[in-house]
Amino acid sequence: MRSSVPRFRDVERQASGLQPVQCLPPCHERQNSMWFIKDACGIVCAIITWLLVFFAVFVVLFVMLIPSKNLTYSLVNGTLFNSLAFLAVASHFRAMCTDPGAVPKGNATKEYIESLQLKPGQVVYKCPKCCSIKPDRAHHCSVCKRCIRKMDHHCPWVNNCVGESNQKYFVLFTMYISLISLHALVMVVFHFLYCFEDDWTKCSTFSPPATVILLILLCFEGLLFLIFTSVMFGTQIHSICTDETGIEKLKREDPTWEKAPSLEAMKSVFGGPLSMAWLSPFTDLSCQKDTLDPVPMFPQGEIIEEDVIEIPLEPH
């Protein structure tokens, strides 16, 4: 049953004077230290991802391009493929080591709630697992052990949650993996045709059986990666444009927030107006600072026991 009082959607965005930094998405949660989840399964999956990319680079270079007699063909395709592979690995690293939008732990104190200067009748929620005041659209991740703003899902392949602060890098990762997979498949087809027309002993520095095995493995890897990342890329873009995360769709949550137009939602995720910076994993999300008020420290105090806190009405 829904509460008759309005829910406080995002206690750290609506509180006046508390957050002088307004970002796309908010950057007040960012920390100078690197974010890294110590999950064995996620670390193994991330290492496997990197190894598969390096395997593809090895086969493309040493089986197909370097032995090629066409220097222009080798230079153009080698530059393009390695550039895309580098951007894919960089995007993966940023998605893995960027705070996805974790809510501060242990801020569910009476002093902190009072400092928010909420209106009477508003309701705030405490996460019983990480003892945080839970903003609207935040969900608790059992792997990260934190509440994550606009959490889409936890991806073991990047060993991190995909949330409002690292979704851009995850989208870029899936896009660049899709591109290098498609590029590798095209080059494999051309190389097979070239080897069939020419002597197999001359089209590669490896023996014919080894060449065939490596090309088949690359073809299989590229096909799987292309299907998986293309679907994931399309799903992420659809979620961004509809302003609805994967968890919200899965749980069929009724929107309690005002949905942003598609272009504004894209700007929020990628950090500003449409530009080449959208395609770069090295550009941070844009942030405009207001220097009028200092940023206060979170008030200290004991963690409240209630999971649902309603601001009392003022006496008449």
Image: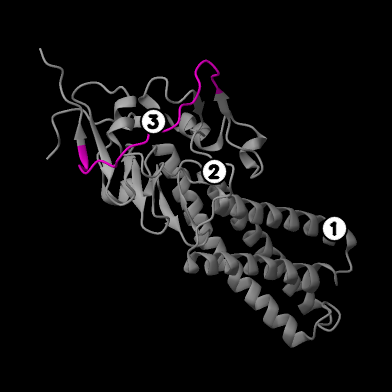
Indicate the amino acid at tag 3.
Glu
Looking at the picture, how far across and down is residue 188, in whole percent? Answer: 70, 69
Q: Is residue 92 left or right of residue 39?
A: right
Q: Is residue 306 above or below residue 80?
A: above
Span highlighted in magenta in the image: 289-308
* Nearer the camera: disc 3 or disc 1: 3
Looking at the picture, how far across and down is residue 184, in whole percent? Answer: 68, 64
Structural distance between the alpha carbons of marks 3 and 1: 51 Å
Label 2 crowding class (10 Å Cα cut-off): few <14, some 14-19, many 20+?
many
Q: Nearer the viewer, residue 275 or 134?
A: 134
Which label belongs to residue 75?
1
The residue carrying mark 3 is: 12
Q: Earlier in the sequence, mark 2 or mark 3?
A: 3
Instruction: Please state, as top left, top right, bottom left or bottom right, where the N terminus lies in the image.
Output: top left
Q: Is residue 148 above or below residue 232?
A: above
Indicate the amino acid at tag 2.
Lys
Which label belongs to residue 168?
2
Q: Nearer the viewer, residue 243 or 123?
A: 123
The quarter of the picture where residue 273 lies is: top right
Q: Earlier in the sequence, mark 1 or mark 2?
A: 1
Label 1 crowding class (10 Å Cα cut-off): few <14, some 14-19, many 20+?
few
Q: Is residue 259 visible?
A: no
